[in-house]
Structures are given as structure tokens and as C-alpha cells.
Image: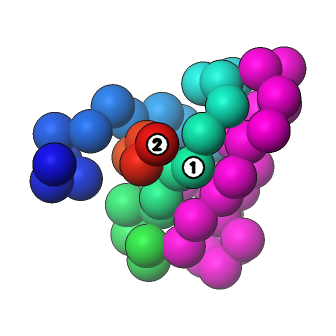
Amino acid sequence: MAMENSPQFNTGEKPGNGIYQCRFCGKFAIIKSPDEVLPDCPKCKKPTTYFKKT
């Protein structure tokens, strides 16, 4: 599945458990709890849109 067809979430949202990839640099963020929010991208160091990988 192409990233563009994957569900998208923004920094600050609570998308649930999974692996999310920054749309700008490709760095991954791992969410382990349903209450955890997506952080700013750890590489870009700014808010971003993530694509859900798993």
C-alpha cells in the first residue's frame, strides 16, 4: 500500500497503537498506548502529518 493511500494523522492526535511514518522525512514514530499522542517528528523537529504503517 502506498503511503498516500494509508490513513493520515497529525501531531497531537491519538491515533492508537501502531507505527507511523512522517510524510516529509520518512522517520518512524511508534505509539504503544491508545492514550499516547503523536509527537513532533523526531527528525524534522516540527509538527507533521504521519501515515499509519501498521
Q: Is residue 2 left or right of residue 25?
A: left
The image quarter containing residue 40 is bottom right
Please indicate, yes or no, whether residue 47 appears anywhere in the rendered image. yes
Residue type at mark 1 is Ile
Tell me: residue 3, above or below residue 37.
Answer: below
Q: Are marks 2 and 1 in contact (CB under 8 Å)?
A: yes
Q: Position of residue 26 (x, y in %)?
A: 43, 73
Q: Is residue 5 left or right of residue 49?
A: left
Q: Helix or strand or loop: what does disc 1 sit on?
A: strand
Task: State the residue at coordinates (57%, 49%).
Answer: 19
> How dense is the environment of label 1, judged by Cα within 10 Å: few (below 14), some, or many (20 and up)?
some
The image quarter containing residue 12 is top right
Task: State the residue at coordinates (44%, 77%).
Answer: 25
Give the residue number, with chain letter if any, for mark 2.
54
Give the residue number, with chain letter if any, for mark 1.
19
Q: Helix or strand or loop: what does disc 2 sit on?
A: loop
Q: Position of residue 3 (x, y in %)?
A: 24, 53
Q: Position of residue 48 (x, y in %)?
A: 53, 53
Task: State the residue at coordinates (79%, 38%).
Answer: 32
For marks 2 and 1 on the same chain, the one whose residue lies earlier in the sequence: 1
The image quarter containing residue 37 is top right
Q: Is residue 32 magenta?
A: yes
Main secondary structure type of the part rendered in magenta: loop
Please indicate, yes or no, whether residue 50 appears anywhere in the rendered image. no
Magenta part of the chain: 27-50
Farthest residue in the front direction? 54
Residues 44 and 54: in front is 54
Residue type at mark 2 is Thr
